[in-house]
Amino acid sequence: MRHARYMILLLMAACGGEPGGVASQTLVGSDESAELRGLGPDGSTTVALHTELGVGAPINLREAPAPDARILMVLPQGATVTVVERTTPDKGYYRVEYFGRTGWAYGHHLELALVATSSALTDEQQENILERARRSVGYSYWWGGGRFGCDLGRGDCNGSCPGCTHVGEGGADCSGMVAKAWAVPASAPGTCVNGHPYSTGDFSGASYHWRTIERANIAPADAFVTRGSGHIMIRGRGVSSAGWPNIIECSGCAAGCIHHYRAVSSDDYKVIRRDAEL
């Protein structure tokens, strides 16, 4: 991101129900002829699919990426929309979804959300995450898998992933372990049942139920994730004498799921935090 301006989004205080808005050419939102000030100065900022964006001022949700396209509704200030179908804008318009309604919103008033530093998880929430993550330790690496603990067999991984083979009841890959430890929605409940829809690319680029935070604010139960697809791991408690963080990770076929201290490059990894919705 070339634009350094972020805003901390407030949730809408509605009691429920569908958002309002009637398809009409008479609906008017913000000035779409203005120079982009939100997602990049030239409207070319790439945003990962499923990224949540905040609406900084009322903005038209249009049927097509053009200033004369039919207006579907006016997105209210403070709303949150989700990027869908494509990662790059079209003439400054982003393809977004709002409460099941999909359209094009001009990037002038769309902002990425950065989690507030005060929103650290409670000690109990952190420990619940770490306890679930520690259940994976000793299990085999299982590409695309996430099932461990509960007296399951430890499993066995052979070969070089993603072409590796796995046998046995239990095991996890890096994103499977984190999805289970974080108890993110859409995952099969608990660590005993396999199944989750998240990849490292999702954790790195999207913000379903987590947010990017400044590395200086990292806390136990946060996660280091590569900037793009690659690897993700849970931050444990404490550091080594060399200053390396305590890490729980499912690192590959050879090592499996381990708990140790290791160096984590700030050039390669960013930090994300689970929303306090455990």
Image: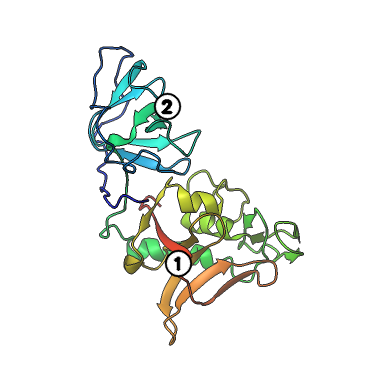
Residue highlighted by disc 1 = 267
For mark 1, does the 10 Å Cα neighbourhood hold few (<14), some (14 to 19), or many (20 or more) residues? few
Q: Position of residue 233 (x, y in %)?
A: 51, 64
Q: Which mark is residue 100?
A: 2
Tell me if residue 93 comes above or below residue 195 in the rendering. above
Q: Earlier in the sequence, mark 2 or mark 1?
A: 2
Write the residue at 63% across / 57% down: 147
Please name which of the two marks, 2 or 1, marks the residue nearer to the observer.
Answer: 1
For mark 2, does the 10 Å Cα neighbourhood hold few (<14), some (14 to 19), or many (20 or more) residues? few
| Residue 18 in view, yes or no | no
User: Relative to the observer, which residue lies in front, 12 or 60?
Assistant: 60
Write the residue at 65% across / 54% down: 145
Q: Is residue 6 left or right of residue 125?
A: left
Q: Is residue 228 left or right of residue 113?
A: right
Write the residue at 47% across / 56% down: 182
Of the residues shown, which amino acid type is indicated by label 2? Gly
